Image (spheres, rainbow, N blue to C red):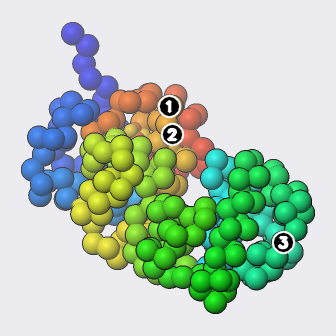
Amino acid sequence: MTNPPARPATPGSELRLPRKPRDVTGESRTALVRRARRIGRRLAQMYPDAQCELDYRNPYELLVATILSAQCTDVRVNLVTPALFEAYPNPEAMAAADRTELEELIRSTGFFRAKANSLLGMASRVVDEYGGEIPGTLDELVTLPGAGRKTANVVLGNAFDVPGITVDTHIGRLSRRFGWTTQTDPVKAEHEIGALFPPKDWVMLCHRMIFHGRRVCMARKPACGACGLADLCPSFGEGPTDPEVAAKLVKGPVSEVTQW
Ligand code: SF4
């Protein structure tokens, strides 16, 4: 019989973990909440500078950037938005945009025709229904073309300081690996994750989880052997556990994710 992979020695790792990676349902509610909050605190230590990786100066710019970020990297969006915001600095200007010129400006973000539709529709509705101001509630934001619940929560949390959980691909994957939820439905997952933390922590928790998902806990090969959450994660072993092998998978400085 082979032994399970050794966990890296991590300071402060006295917490007892379930024996099997998916055996999280055996945790009591109290233990689950405690472990979730320890993960939250650890992520805060690992990524003290985590923040929204889209560049924006106001709710309109964040909404535009978030619409463009669908199926596209934040880095690519940030390359496109300076010229876009110069050409269309507010919803009125966007609503009056020439479609061909708009499509050309956003072409490199992919799905540019659909995104142009969303931007033009969103801007027209903001002008017609909300006097040119981006609305600050979930119910209103989700009525805007291109703004689903995920986009609305990004805008609310970052531009309006309204707590929200944004269940994107990273947060969905990590929260299932952490054993916080088994839901694949984003709205159900949002409620289950939110119930583990006070609302004031939701927005920063999301930024830190996205950072971790991009740098360490990737979809295909999570770098478990170099992960600062290894002692708290029931999915340790889903990726390589050898520290040297895992370190090569980490995107960015390894010290950031192993020392805190
Ligand atoms: S990299 Fe591995 S140990 Fe770290 S959070 Fe992801 S699955 Fe868990």
Residue denoted by label 2: 218
Label pair 1/3, CB-CB below 8 angstroms? no
Name the residue type under label 2.
Met
Q: Nearer the viewer, residue 59 or 255?
A: 59
Q: Nearer the viewer, residue 252 or 73?
A: 73
Name the residue type under label 1.
Lys
- Which quarter of the rendered image does ligand 1 occupy? top left
Left or right of residue 215, residue 182 in this image:
left
Label pair 2/1, CB-CB below 8 angstroms? yes
Can you name the residue that lies furthest to the front here? 128
Q: Tag 3's secondary structure?
A: loop
Q: Tag 2's secondary structure?
A: loop
* Gap in angstroms between the C-alphas marked 1 and 3: 43 Å
Q: Tag 1's secondary structure?
A: loop
* Image coordinates for residue 54, horizontal then vertical, percent: 65, 65
Q: Residue at x 15, y 41 (%)?
A: 25
* Residue 163 quadrant: bottom left
* Image coordinates for residue 37, horizontal then vertical, percent: 27, 61
Observer able to see residue 86: yes
Residue denoted by label 1: 221
* Gap in angstroms between the C-alphas marked 3 and 2: 38 Å
Query: In this picture, is 44 found above or below 257?
Result: below
Can you name the residue that lies furthest to the top here? 1
Q: Residue at x 24, y 34 (%)?
A: 22
Q: Residue at x 61, y 61 (%)?
A: 146
Residue denoted by label 3: 97
N-terminal of the two: label 1 or label 3? 3
Q: Residue at x 56, y 35 (%)?
A: 249
